[in-house]
Amino acid sequence: MSDVSDVIMTLAGPVAAAEVSGPALCREWLINDQSQLRKHSKDPRSSTDLVELQSLARVRRYPLSSLSNLHLNQEDALREATELHRAHGDALVAVSTPRRFQHDVEQTADALRKVAAEAKIHIVLGIAPPEDANFEVQVATVVSQLASGIRTDADAEGGLFPGFIGEIDAADLQSLRAAVEAHRVSQAPLLLVGEISHDALQLLEGAIWRRCAFFDVPITSPMSVAELQARGAFIGFSAPAGAADISWQEYPYRRPLRTEQDFHAATDLLSLTSSGLRFRTDLTAYGGPGHSRDSLPLVWNEEGGG
C-alpha cells in the first residue's frame, strides 16, 4: 500500500494529497439500501407513502416511514456528486456505507467508480471485515483488499481500491478487533462510530491514533471526545437524520450537537465533517440540503492537513 502520508487511495487508484484542493466529506453512505430497517419501525404510516415536499417535515422526523426513502442508488449518488463538483470543483468523498447496507461490495465499488468518473470527483471507499469469518480470515481479507484491490479479475475493467477501514461500529468488538489489527498492519486510516467502551479502548491501544477518526461519540461514552482528541484522533460530525433536526421538542437520543456550528464550537483541531447523506430526503432533489457547503478542507494524511 502506498504511503498514506503523501497519497490518498481512491477507488481509481492513488492520488497525491496535494492534488485534492476541494472539501473532503468524510463519512457518507453514498450508495446504500436500508430497507431491512423497516422491520424495526413502529411508525404506522403506509409503506406506499411517497417523499413529497409538502410532507418533508414528517418524513425527516420519521425517516423510516417511507419505503422509497430507504436507499440511495447510483442515480442519486451521481446527482449529488455532480452538484458537489459544480459547487466546489475538485472534491473528495469518503464513502463508509456499512457492509449490511450493501448488496455486494464489488458491485457498490464499481458503481461508485463510475459516479466518480462521470461527476469528476474523488471517491474513497471504506472496507470492513467480513462478518461470517474467523479473526485470521477477517484480518487477511481486509489487508489483501487494501493492498491489491477489491477486484482482482484480470478481465475486469481496472482495479477497485479501498482507501480506509470502516465504518466500524465500536460496540461490535469482534469486528473492531479485526479492524484494528488490519489497521495496524496496513497503516490505513480507520473510521469508527458510536460509544467507545473500556473494552473497545483496550482493543484500540494498538491503533495509530493520528490515523483514526471517531464519529457520533455520545456524551455518555466512557471514552470521551476530549480523551480521543488528546490521543491525536480525528473527531467527526454527521448531520442528524434527514440532515436537519427540525423538531421543536426534545426526544430520546437526540444528539447534543445538532448543527455543524455547535460541533466546531465544542471541539478544537483535527475535526472532520460529513454532510449526513443517509436517506433520500437528504438529497437536494428531494428538498434536503445535500452536500454540506461548509465542510472542512481536510484529507486523511499523517499531517492532518489538506
Image (cartoon, rainbow, N blue to C red):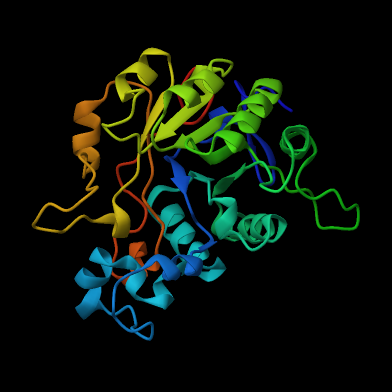
- Give the tally of numbered discs: 0
Q: Nearer the viewer, residue 219 or 159?
A: 219
Q: Residue 159 placed where, x, y %?
A: 78, 48
62 on left or right of 302: left
Vertical order, 81 against 50 (above or below): above
Quarter occupied by residue 218: top left
Locate residue 219 relative to residue 271 in the image: left or right: left
162 or 41, which lies in front? Answer: 41
The residue depicted at 21 percent of the width and 44 percent of the height is 259
Can residue 302 be spotted in the picture?
no
Drawn side of residue 25 relative to residue 176, left or right: left
| Residue 12 in view in this figure | yes
Q: Residue at x 47, y 21 (%)?
A: 201
Image location of residue 250, percent across then percent down: 12, 52
Q: Is residue 37 above or below residue 86?
A: below
Where is residue 129? Give x, y as percent. 66, 41
Examine the image and state in which quarter residue 57 appears.
bottom left
Q: Nearer the viewer, residue 246 or 93?
A: 246
Say if 8 sits above or below 92 in the image.
above
Task: Give how far across and how far down residue 154 sits, in percent.
Answer: 91, 52
Which residue is at the front of the view, 222 or 185?
222
